[in-house]
Amino acid sequence: MSFLVALGSGDPDPWVEQFRALLPDHQIVKLGDSYDPAGVEFAMTWYHPPGSLAVYPHLKAVFSMGAGVDHLFRDPNLPDVPMARVVDPDLTNRMSEYVVLHALSVMRQTRRYRDQQNQKLWLDDDWQPAASDVRVGVMGMGVLGSDAAHKLQLIGFDVAGWSRSKKTLDGIETFAGEAELSAFLARTDILVVLLPLTDDTRGIINAKLLKSLAHDGRVPAPSLINAGRGNLQIETDILACLDDGTLHEVVLDVFQIEPLPQNSPLWTHPRVTVTPHNASVSDPMAVARAIAAQVRRVEQGEALLNTVSRARGY
Ligand code: NAP
Ligand code: GLV
């Protein structure tokens, strides 16, 4: 029996090496190798070429290499087998590091002090808010969003979360669905986006939504941190909102087109931070371990964990 590493981008070899160590009773193969398609029972994918998973008659499960699964649904010939995504403390912690780092950086104005330092400028006129005065709203209160929300709360931020279904979390105000979106946005100074990309969420970070964030004078203007997916956002709207004062600062790890094109004004905007989709990378050591444990579950007749719903798209 074989385990297929099906990467559309990136180096498959570190993954092959990990899976060989973790699943020694499986033949570990990668796209382009020569192997018997009938032997392939499991596949791990990241942006596999559409159609490339349709040729394995005995495939039992497909694993996303990351937490996101929108790359799976690009494939109109996705095999009709159970699919699972990565849920692992390593991935979760990395994302929370990113969110806490940038929420603190926005609040403590590190961008402004870097500029002042470059000019050797010592100003005595500044005021620093306490974290408890800054309202962070996390859109997407799943595995990553709820951990980030919890860690932001430990720092002292006034945290709320928005998701499809209602959550009950100690000390975190929760909002759910379309009906409660406006109330959530109206109490948000820093918006953190950790939604999956689905038909319902595509383009959700647009001018209308950004203008609905809190504009009640608690902070100069609200800020945005998106580490979910690039196609959640309309980048021309974000730029317009920065320029008309609707937004103060923007931190983006994900973009409508990746890599971010050289001519994107986001690269050089003075109040935009660009990171290259690495808020939380899938570390082969940690993630292969989590996927190998899932393979063992299937082999022992247990149900897959962290399954993906085709109907919901995440
Ligand atoms: P998850 O556990 O599936 O959580 C998704 C959350 O979004 C859930 O709370 C869900 O609501 C909510 N949601 C989905 N559709 C919604 C809608 N239409 N309206 C309101 N809420 C909605 O996913 P996760 O593990 O936290 O990961 C989230 C995303 O992060 C991934 O899909 C991926 O795109 C992104 N990501 C990015 C990086 C990076 O490096 N930049 C790394 C990893 C992941 P319910 O709770 O009600 O279902
Ligand atoms: C990364 O973007 C992931 O979805 O894990």
Image (tube, rainbow, N blue to C red):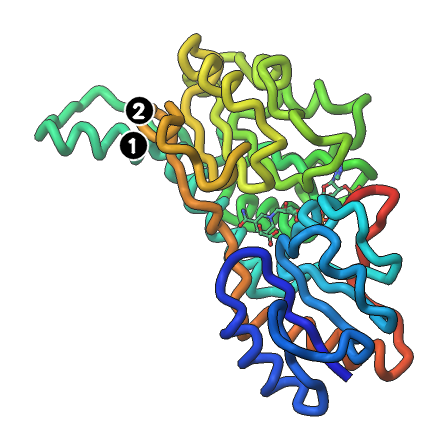
Q: Tell me which residue sits at (65%, 35%) in the image.
A: 139
| Residue 52 occupies quadrant | bottom right
- Where is residue 23 shown, x and y percent of the image? 67, 85
Give the spatial CA distance, label 2 vs label 1. 9 Å
| Residue 125 occupies quadrant | top left
Is residue 297 or residue 83 the one in the foreground?
A: 83
Check the picture and name the quadrant holding the N terminus.
bottom right
Q: Tell me which residue sits at (82%, 77%) in the image.
A: 38
Instruction: Name which residue type carries label 1.
Output: Arg
Position of residue 52 relative to residue 149, above or below, is below
Q: Nearer the viewer, mark 2 or mark 1?
A: 2
- Where is residue 26 shown, x and y percent of the image? 71, 86
Instruction: Name which residue type carries label 2.
Output: Pro
Q: Earlier in the sequence, mark 2 or mark 1?
A: 1
Mark identifier at residue 111: 1
Looking at this rendering, what residue extends furthest in the left direction? 120
Q: Is residue 169 visible?
A: no
Within-10-Å neighbours for mark 1: few <14, some 14–19, many 20+: some
Within-10-Å neighbours for mark 2: few <14, some 14–19, many 20+: some
- Where is residue 2 shown, x and y percent of the image? 73, 80
Position of residue 197 relative to residue 184, above or below, is below
Looking at this rendering, what residue extends furthest in the front direction? 34
Q: Is residue 93 visible?
A: yes
Asked whether disc 2 touches disc 1, contact meaning CB atoms under 8 Å apart, the reply is yes
Mark 1 vs ligand 1: CB below 8 Å: no
Is residue 303 or residue 108 the one in the foreground?
A: 303
Q: Secondary structure at mark 1?
A: helix
Q: Tell me which residue sits at (71%, 77%) in the image.
A: 3
Residue pointed to by mark 2: 270
- Where is residue 156 shown, x and y percent of the image? 51, 42
Q: Tell me which residue sits at (40%, 12%) in the image.
A: 243
